[in-house]
Image (tube, rainbow, N blue to C red):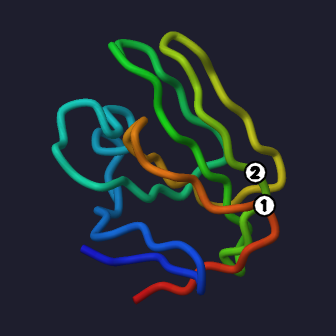
Amino acid sequence: MLQLRSPGWSSGPVLEATTFWSRFIGLRPIATNGLLLRARSVHTAGMAHPLGVVGLDRHFVVVGARTVVAHRVVVMASATWILELPPDRALPNVGETLAKC
C-alpha cells in the first residue's frame, strides 16, 4: 500500500496494480481507497457505479481528473499513471504534484 498526497489533498492508502489481471479488474472488487496503475487509459466495463479517474505524468503531476460513468473508456495520452478512486472521493486539481508516501 502507498499513499499519494499534495498540500491540499490525500488519497489515503491505495494499492498499486502490478499484474495484467489486477490492471484489467481495476477497482471493481476491491474495497479500498484507490488503485494506482501504470497506464494511459482505463475502462469502466462491468462497473455499477461511477469511477474517479486521475491521470498523472511521470513526475506525478495531475494531468487530468474526472468522474466517469460505467461502460466508458478513458484515454489520457499525457498520463503515465492512472489513479482510480471510488466515486465519493474528492479528486485532486489538475496541475497539483502528488508525492508518493
Q: Which mark is residue 64?
A: 2
What percent of the width, then of the height, locates residue 92? 62, 61
Amino acid found under the numbered disc labelled 2: Gly
Q: Residues within 10 Å of mark 1 (few under 14, many from 20)?
A: some
Q: Nearer the viewer, residue 29 or 17?
A: 29
Query: What residue is at 37 percent from the left and 54 percent from the top?
Result: 35
Q: Quadrant of residue 14?
A: bottom left
> In the rendered structure, which amino acid carries the disc numbered 1?
Val
Query: Mark 2 or mark 1: which comes first in sequence?
Result: 2
Task: Count neighbours of disc 2 (C-alpha within 10 A) and say few if under 14, some if 14 to 19, many if 20 or more.
Answer: many
- Judge whether 78 appears above or below 50 on screen: below
Q: Are marks 2 and 1 in contact (CB under 8 Å)?
A: yes
Q: Residue at x 59, y 86 (%)?
A: 7
- Dot 1 lies on which element? loop
* Residue underneath mark 1: 94
Which residue is at 50% across, 79% downward? 5
Q: Residue at x 24, y 73 (%)?
A: 1
